[in-house]
Image: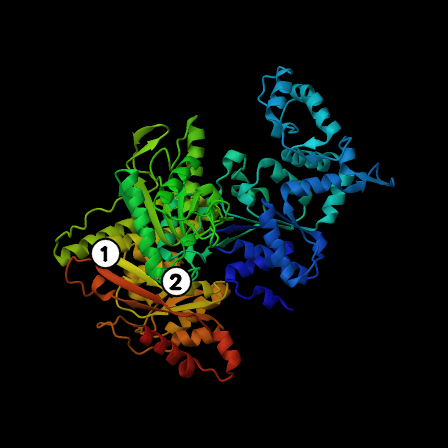
């Protein structure tokens, strides 16, 4: 077995994560967007490290559920049967540590004893259900002003006076060994922070630490990881701050937001290719966090052209639909009719459908409503009558092929072909936020993340349901539309304006946009600091969307998943046909990346435009005087493997939309740099500007073609020639796609 077998099927970002070198690049934070394959990255990382010679027993991987740990263990052991990697939850790790025999006594002293004895336990600790009533009664006798919960009994956050009064309760736990799960974490931390010998023992036991769902860890779990790690760099964590929805359980999103501050030399990798949902669902998901801090922002991209199911429904790339109903009866009738139509039209199973809600009370209502329409529900128990017998006494079975009705919290980690997201109104989604202004903002932020989780459960169909009136908590109430819902589209009234005035309006709007940000640049550089480049990347996307809006363009992008095959850590040359000045923002939106493009030098004389062209790395050439190839080669040499250039191989705009002859320059550059070549085909952009005749909206389509690895081509054919082989190959691909 070699590394390539483990890395097979990974995209460039996943591959970079699995191959991460802690010694060179320190701790690693992976921001893994929804549906981006984080579990695969974690398990392949473990497999890769074992292949590199790390003893499996020296690897510790932590997650939040025993089910997730078992799934990861099964995947790891497919390649390395019986590998002794410790894959477990935080609580089972802490219990294991307390039961371990560790060196006891001073340095140099012999002998071992169970760690729990060092902490004062008289019996082996055994997790048990706590009796809140008994604890409250015992606590009331202490007459404490501070609010103490059973889970925080062993916390060290209390002052000396409170800790002294809590000692009898703590001693009772140590005498009986009857701990709750949070006791285990606090006591393990206490052991590591107060006993240097035990701390060194456990640090030696695990050389590499991996943590799943890092956004969900609480402060005590963070301390446990930090103490086990010490000053070492071997920390590999995966999480998604956009899916941090367990603040009510004590999870602290700050742990993932502060990671790069806590570990100054650390590296950050984003996993943005989503292999679950169609592009239009992801466009909505990306809009949810448009205003979040730029250094944590992710842009989900559809990485699977067939969706996760391969059904024709996925190919349709349906836009999310907002349904407004006056009452629950009207709403449930819409849901039932839609389920039946989609089931029959696309041969979907009942289990491919889900209704998601914010609260459990809503779940019970929708379950009963579906039963009233004789629609099966996952988890219901029914009697199966045996032939020739009465129904009574027949065996019972649990329905597995039924519609899922879930709270959004329960749906995390799951996915469904079609999702009906119900209750999108104020006080339901988002739920009612209470307390101080700061507390309300914190709650609202978590509600927004919960909405994101619900949206990203949908693979191919998403229906957002707003019901104006419904019974809630005992009475009929009227609800306002949720602030999270997409804004209602305005009527498509065509504004009549002479084309010449329209072009003046567009030019002024676009140049004003550029000028505004030029003037704001000093402030923006100061504000974003080291994150300025990331801000610029996002702002170019915003600018491109703005251009499409003022130009009245409806843009459709086909096969964007092909971009997931591109390794952007290598030189990449993007080529496309040329019909309009509008092609540049169209290309930016297609790639969802900023690339410098080769353009004629005269464009550099346009006010404001020239500033931004230099800012994004454009290469300006003088076609009349020659020397274009020299200028491009110089720019490529300066950028090295980071070179990302867009070139129109026709060299000029087509007046008819037909594909012209290609110049060979870009193909020579690709071969000289053993680069990846990515072809795009744009149709319909000519009438956007140059051939504009009226104010009607323009429909533009971009198709992303399969990338070509020039290095692989040259390995297969030693005489591979850019002009003879590569140029005709790309020209035919693009011509066929037009």
Q: Residues within 10 Å of mark 1 (few under 14, many from 20)?
A: many
Q: Is residue 499 left or right of residue 580?
A: left
User: How are the residues colored?
Assistant: rainbow
Q: Is residue 319 left or right of residue 267?
A: left
Across and down, in percent, residue 332 comes to 31, 43
Foreground pick, 299 / 68: 68
Q: Residue furthest front?
A: 388
Q: Which residue is mark 1?
A: 551
Which structural element holds mark 1?
Answer: loop
Foreground pick, 177 / 208: 177
Alpha carbons under labels 2 and 1: distance apart: 35 Å
Who's the residue at 35% across and 39% down the image?
423
Q: Residues within 10 Å of mark 2 (few under 14, many from 20)?
A: some
Foreground pick, 581 / 202: 202
Residue 311, numbered label: 2
Looking at the rendered image, the quarter that the C terminus falls into is bottom left
Across and down, in percent, residue 64 comes to 58, 44
């Amino acid at each position: 077995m070699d590394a390539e077998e483990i890395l097979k099927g990974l995209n460039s970002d996943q591959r970079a994560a699995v191959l991460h070198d802690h010694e060179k690049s320190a701790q690693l934070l992976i921001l893994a967007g929804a549906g981006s394959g984080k579990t695969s990255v974690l398990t392949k990382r473990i497999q890769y490290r074992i292949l590199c010679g790390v003893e499996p027993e020296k690897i510790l991987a932590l997650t939040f559920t025993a089910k997730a740990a078992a799934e990861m263990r099964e995947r790891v052991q497919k390649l390395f049967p019986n590998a002794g990697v410790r894959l477990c939850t935080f609580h089972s790790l802490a219990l294991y540590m307390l039961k371990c025999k560790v060196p006891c006594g001073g340095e140099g002293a012999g002998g071992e004893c169970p760690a729990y004895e060092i902490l004062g336990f008289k019996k082996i600790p055994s997790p048990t259900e706590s009796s809140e009533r008994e604890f409250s009664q015992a606590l009331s006798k202490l007459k404490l002003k501070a609010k103490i919960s059973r889970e925080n009994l062993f916390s060290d956050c209390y002052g000396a006076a409170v800790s002294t009064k809590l000692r009898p309760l703590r001693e009772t736990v140590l005498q009986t060994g009857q701990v709750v799960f949070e006791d285990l974490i606090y006591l393990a931390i206490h052991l590591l922070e107060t006993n240097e010998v035990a701390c060194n023992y456990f640090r030696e036991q695990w050389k590499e630490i991996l943590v799943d769902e890092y956004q969900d860890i609480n402060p005590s779990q963070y301390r446990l990881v930090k103490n086990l790690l010490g000053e070492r760099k071997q920390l590999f964590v995966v999480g998604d701050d956009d899916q941090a929805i367990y603040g009510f359980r004590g999870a602290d999103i700050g742990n993932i937001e502060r990671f790069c501050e806590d570990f100054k030399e650390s590296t950050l990798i984003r996993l943005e290719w989503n292999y679950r949902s169609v592009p239009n669902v992801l466009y909505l998901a990306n809009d949810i966090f448009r205003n979040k801090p730029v250094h944590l922002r992710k842009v989900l991209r559809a990485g699977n052209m067939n969706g996760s199911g391969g059904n024709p429904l996925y190919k349709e790339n349906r836009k999310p639909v907002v349904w407004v109903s006056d009452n629950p009866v009207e709403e449930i009738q819409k849901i039932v009719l839609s389920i039946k139509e989609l089931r029959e039209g696309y041969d979907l199973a009942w289990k491919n459908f889900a209704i998601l809600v914010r609260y459990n009370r809503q779940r019970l209502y929708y379950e009963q409503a579906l039963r009233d329409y004789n629609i099966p529900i996952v988890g219901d128990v029914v009697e199966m009558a045996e032939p020739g017998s009465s129904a009574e006494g027949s065996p019972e079975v649990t329905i597995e092929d039924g519609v899922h009705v879930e709270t959004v919290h329960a749906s995390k980690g799951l996915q469904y072909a079609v999702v009906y997201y119900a209750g999108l109104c104020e006080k339901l989604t988002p739920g009612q936020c209470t307390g101080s202004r700061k507390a309300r903002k914190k709650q609202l932020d978590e509600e927004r993340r919960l909405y994101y989780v619900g949206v990203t459960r949908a693979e191919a169909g998403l229906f957002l349901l707003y019901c104006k009136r419904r019974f809630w908590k005992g009475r009929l109430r009227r609800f306002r539309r949720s602030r999270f819902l997409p804004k209602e589209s305005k009527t498509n009234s065509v504004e009549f304006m002479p084309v010449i005035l329209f072009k003046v309006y567009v030019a002024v709007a676009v140049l004003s946009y550029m000028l505004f940000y030029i003037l704001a640049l000093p402030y923006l550089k100061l504000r974003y600091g080291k994150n300025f480049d990331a801000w610029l990347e996002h702002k170019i996307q915003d600018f491109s969307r703005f251009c499409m809006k003022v130009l009245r363009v409806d843009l459709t992008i086909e096969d964007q998943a092909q971009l997931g095959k591109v390794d952007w850590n290598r030189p990449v040359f993007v080529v496309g046909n040329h019909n309009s000045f509008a092609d540049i923002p169209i290309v930016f939106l297609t790639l969802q990346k900023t690339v410098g493009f080769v353009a004629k030098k005269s464009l550099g004389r346009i006010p404001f435009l020239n500033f931004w062209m230099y800012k994004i790395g454009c290469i300006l050439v003088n076609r009349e005087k020659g020397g274009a190839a020299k200028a491009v080669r110089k720019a490529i040499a300066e950028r090295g493997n980071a070179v990302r250039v867009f070139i129109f191989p026709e060299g000029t705009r087509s007046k008819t939309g037909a594909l012209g002859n290609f110049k060979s320059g870009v193909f020579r550059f690709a071969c000289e740099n053993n680069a990846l070549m990515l072809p795009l085909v744009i149709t319909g952009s000519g009438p956007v500007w140059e051939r504009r005749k009226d104010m009607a909206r323009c429909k533009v389509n971009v198709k992303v073609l399969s990338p070509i690895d020039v290095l692989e081509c040259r390995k297969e054919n030693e005489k591979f020639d850019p002009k003879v082989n590569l140029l005709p190959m790309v020209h035919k691909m693009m011509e066929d796609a037009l």
